[in-house]
Amino acid sequence: MLIPCLACDSRFIPDEYFRACHDYNRGRDLVAWTCPRCGNRDDLRVLPGELGFGCPGRRRFDVHDRFRVPGLRRKRQILRLDISLDEKTWRVPTRLSPTGVPDHRFTCAETRLPAPLIRGRYAGDS
């Protein structure tokens, strides 16, 4: 079975395809994938038996296209996603910020929280 790049129509064996997955966003349950041939970057959702392609909506990822991959399995870990097909497993790590905690820029961008309180006032007040 060959899995396509939706940008350049190149096709990849599963090992080559899943080795190109590089960031797992646990908050949105998305995997970042960069095509080894054309350099296109896609976000996708790994679902049991299929890959879901789409785009971010207002507060969620909308899957528009699905590509069937019989036998595809996934297991969420604390700082990674394990993708399994037949006997092979690929580990996609969660991107960490320089402070060593998961980078949730893409999951919290919609939420605008007030600045933290400093001595009974908001940090932005003068």
Image (spheres, helix red, strand yellow):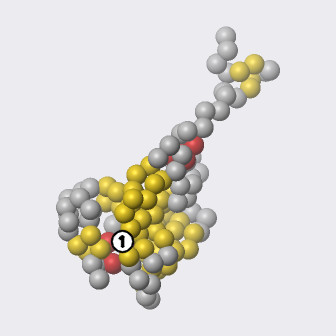
Residue 100 visible in the shown view:
no
Quarter containing the C terminus: top right
**Total residue callouts:** 1
Q: Is residue 79 left or right of residue 63?
A: right
User: Does residue 111 lie above or below 27 as drawn?
Assistant: above
The structure residue drawn at horizontal position 49% and vertical position 76%, both measured from the top left corner, is 48
Residue 60 visible in the shown view:
yes
Residue 50: horizontal and vertical position, in percent? 42, 74
The structure residue drawn at horizontal position 39% and vertical position 59%, both measured from the top left corner, is 64
Judging by the rendered image, the residue that carries numbered circle 1 is 67
Residue projecting furthest to the front: 64
The structure residue drawn at horizontal position 26% and vertical position 74%, both measured from the top left corner, is 12
Quarter containing the N terminus: bottom left
Q: Is residue 57 left or right of residue 26?
A: left
User: Does residue 31 lie above or below 60 as drawn?
Assistant: below
Q: Nearer the viewer, residue 64 or 36?
A: 64
Residue projecting furthest to the top: 126
Residue 63: horizontal and vertical position, in percent? 43, 59
Residue projecting furthest to the bottom: 87
Residue 21: horizontal and vertical position, in percent? 38, 65
Q: Secondary structure at mark 1?
A: strand
Task: Tell me which corner region of the image, top left, top right, bottom left or bottom right, holds residue 109.
Answer: top right
Q: Nearer the viewer, residue 89 or 71?
A: 71
Mark 1, other Cα within 10 Å: few <14 / some 14–19 / many ≥20: few
